[in-house]
């Protein structure tokens, strides 16, 4: 049966491992990007649980899914976000079929197991155990996005095009892979493309041309002197910059009329990306055209916030030790979704293994999935308002 119309076959209480397997068997590789089948399948699961679901398209085959379980009590709902897309398989051969969802030695293998379909399955399973309590309390909202792997495309499109679908949240949980350890933030990412334009000429007569490579290399040299040292965060450390690509020239005996380079700036809380772009343009003095590729702001929740303290306390019970505040190295949809959800305290917490993200033979421990359901349920029981 086509997975796009496959019906959910769960009882009222969802089995997280089985749901993870079903999601792994639905490819949602990005690029090229197609979340249609995955979003439709989860909409069926959530409809059966009593959620009101809304699909949002942000391009051919590209979908976000918003699901709301309304609460009758006081207080705001708890929010959860996770992305439906996965990265490509890579060139290396897999030991296990990446879309078969096979279990071996306590590990569930497949593309997206850790990053991050297991996280989505765990949260839905936790909600299925507490439908009555959630309905009598503040309720819950799931923001399941497409296009995260290529720069939070789906989350940004949803926030811009459908602001009415959002509600103010008491808490936002980002289910990215953390081995069920809570993280309070991440650096931002500003990826930029710089383009230098010149004039072509024969290589034996360079004086008749304008070499774009020279302009680009001058600009890169200025970048190396760009001051980011003053931007430091006590938990995340310093902001960083790296030039990652350079493309120019068609043949050796011509003056190149175009050169492109791309660079990656990782920002910390307190840095404004628009201000940073303005500063960079002034550094290049009009010689370089700048275009953003990825623009994701940093995310940080104050460790001393009462909600964050309660989360850390619950998680410490599961880990058997006090929680040390940490930040993840990757970016998430969380920072893009903060404004439309009212800037709630936000935690990054999921059952996947961080070191397995984007890897060949990606897996997630089945015990970690089971623990993740219990952990999410314990957080839902807190009834944050």
Image: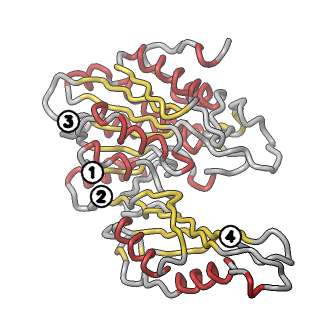
On the question of residue 266 being in view, the answer is yes
Task: Report the Cα–Cα distance between label 1 and label 3.
Answer: 12 Å
Q: Earlier in the sequence, mark 4 or mark 1?
A: 4
Q: Earlier in the sequence, mark 1 or mark 3?
A: 3
- Give the quarter of the figure containing the C terminus: top left
> Residue tagged by mark 1?
345
> Residue tagged by mark 4?
258
What residue is shown at x 43% (from left), y 48% (from top)?
A: 333
What residue is shown at x 25% (from left), y 35% (from top)?
A: 167
Residues at marks 4 and 2 touching, judged by CB atoms closer than 8 Å: no
Q: Earlier in the sequence, mark 2 or mark 1?
A: 2
The mark closer to the camera, 4 or 2, is: 4
> Residue tagged by mark 2?
301
What residue is shown at x 66% (from left), y 40% (from top)?
A: 32
Instruction: In this rendered view, identify the residue nearer to me: 278 or 103.
Output: 278
Q: Is residue 255 left or right of residue 382?
A: right
Q: Is residue 287 left or right of residue 12?
A: right
Instruction: Give the label on residue 286, or none.
Output: none
Q: Secondary structure at mark 4?
A: strand
Q: Secondary structure at mark 1?
A: loop
> For residue 104, what is the image quadrant?
top right
Task: Report the Cα–Cα distance between label 3 and label 4.
Answer: 53 Å
What residue is shown at x 46% (from left), y 48% (from top)?
A: 180
> Residue tagged by mark 3?
76
> For residue 136, what is the image quadrant?
top left
Task: Report the Cα–Cα distance between label 4 and label 2.
Answer: 43 Å
Residues at marks 2 and 1 touching, judged by CB atoms closer than 8 Å: yes
Q: Earlier in the sequence, mark 4 or mark 2?
A: 4
Label 4 crowd bin: few (<14), some (14–19), many (20+), radius 10 Å: many
Instruction: In this rendered view, identify the residue nearer to me: 314 or 84.
Output: 84
């Amino acid at each position: 049966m086509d997975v796009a119309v496959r019906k959910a076959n769960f009882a009222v209480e969802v089995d997280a491992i089985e749901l993870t397997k079903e999601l792994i068997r639905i490819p949602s590789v990005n690029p090229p990007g197609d979340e249609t089948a995955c979003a439709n399948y989860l909409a069926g699961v959530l409809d059966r649980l009593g959620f009101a679901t809304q699909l949002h398209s942000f391009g051919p085959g590209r979908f976000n899914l918003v699901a709301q379980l309304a609460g009758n009590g006081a207080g705001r709902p708890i929010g959860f976000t996770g992305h439906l897309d996965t990265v490509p398989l890579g060139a290396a051969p897999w030991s296990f079929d990446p879309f078969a969802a096979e279990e071996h030695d306590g590990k569930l293998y497949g593309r997206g197991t850790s990053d991050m379909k297991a996280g989505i399955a765990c949260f839905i399973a936790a909600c299925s155990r507490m439908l009555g309590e959630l309905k009598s309390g503040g309720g819950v909202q799931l923001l399941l996005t497409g296009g995260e792997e290529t720069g939070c495309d789906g989350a940004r499109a949803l926030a811009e095009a459908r602001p009415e679908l959002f509600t103010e949240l008491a808490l936002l949980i980002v289910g990215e892979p953390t081995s069920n350890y809570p993280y309070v933030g991440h650096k931002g990412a500003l990826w930029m493309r710089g383009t230098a334009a010149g004039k072509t000429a024969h290589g034996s007569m360079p004086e008749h041309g304008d070499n774009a490579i020279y302009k680009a290399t001058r600009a890169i040299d200025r970048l190396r002197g760009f001051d980011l040292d003053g931007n430091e965060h006590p938990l995340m450390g310093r902001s960083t910059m790296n030039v990652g690509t350079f493309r120019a020239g068609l043949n050796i005996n011509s003056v190149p009329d175009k050169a492109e380079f791309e660079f990656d700036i990782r920002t910390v809380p307190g840095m404004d990306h628009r201000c940073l772009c303005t500063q960079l343009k002034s550094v290049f003095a009009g010689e370089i055209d700048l275009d953003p590729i990825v623009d994701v702001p940093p995310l940080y929740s104050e460790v001393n916030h009462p909600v964050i303290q309660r989360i850390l306390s619950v998680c410490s019970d599961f880990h058997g030790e006090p929680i040390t505040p940490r930040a993840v190295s990757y970016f998430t949809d969380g920072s893009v979704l903060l404004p439309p959800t009212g800037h709630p305290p936000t935690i990054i917490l999921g059952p996947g293994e961080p070191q397995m993200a984007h890897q060949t033979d990606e897996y997630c421990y089945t015990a970690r999935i089971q623990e993740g359901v219990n952990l999410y349920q314990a957080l839902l029981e807190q009834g944050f308002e």
